[in-house]
Image: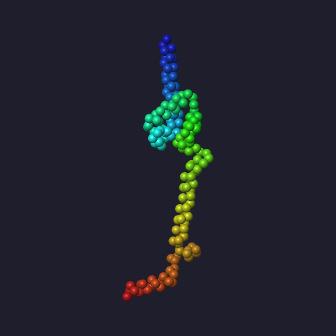
Amino acid sequence: MKTHQGILAILLALALVAGLASSAGAAAVLADLENALMCKCDDKCGKVLINCTCSTADKTRAEYTKMLDSGLTVDQIINMQVDKYGETVLSSPTKSGFNLTAWAMPFVALLAGGFGISKIMESWKRKGAPEDQDTGDEEAPSISAKYSSRIQEELDKIES
């Protein structure tokens, strides 16, 4: 009799652990769904559903929980919402068609900006470099005759 009670206790413990694991899995699936969709509240808060605290979000969560319990997958629910509300209900743009530009443009802009800045810095460097440094000599550049005579005149004025 005691062995039957021990076995029964073990089976109950396993059932409880399995129930907790399945509810944790269901919560994770619901969280994935809430991360993928935007809130559709009347306030047009613009928040991802998992971050929204309005009453519409609570109703939507309950609706999605019922859908998940009925056997629908996350992808099926997302597709139903896109069919009903359009792609604006998605928290991130799809990775196909014209929406692909939303994913690619930040990287293209960074590359183009870096290339442009490097070209500007090269031109500034060339403007500041003396023209007669083609020989690679490290000597001080010679001052043109026009400026050397003017400098000499100024120095003469100072001395007198």
Instruction: Count how many numbered circles sit on residues in the image.
Output: 0
Q: Is residue 145 visible?
A: yes
Residue at position x 50%, y 17% in the image: 8
In this rendering, the answer to whether 49 lies above or below 110 is above
Query: In x, y percent, where is residue 51?
Result: 46, 39
Query: In x, y percent, where is residue 57?
Result: 47, 36
In this rendering, the answer to whether 92 lies above or below 27 is below
Q: Is residue 51 visible?
A: no
In this rendering, the answer to whether 126 lies above or below 57 is below
Q: Quadrant of residue 131?
A: bottom right
Q: Quadrant of residue 134?
A: bottom right
Query: In x, y percent, where is residue 125?
Result: 53, 68
Q: Residue furthest front?
A: 42
Specify the quadrant that holds the C terminus: bottom left
Query: In x, y percent, where is residue 101?
Result: 58, 50
What color scheme is it?
rainbow
Q: Residue furthest top?
A: 1
Q: Which of these two is toward me, 59 or 1?
A: 59
Q: Which of these two is toward me, 82 or 53?
A: 82
Residue at position x 53%, y 36% in the image: 33
Residue at position x 47%, y 38% in the image: 41
Q: Residue furthest bottom?
A: 160
153 sits to left or right of 74 = left
Q: Quadrant of residue 151?
A: bottom left
Q: Residue furthest right?
A: 97
Q: Which of these two is toward me, 127 or 77?
A: 77
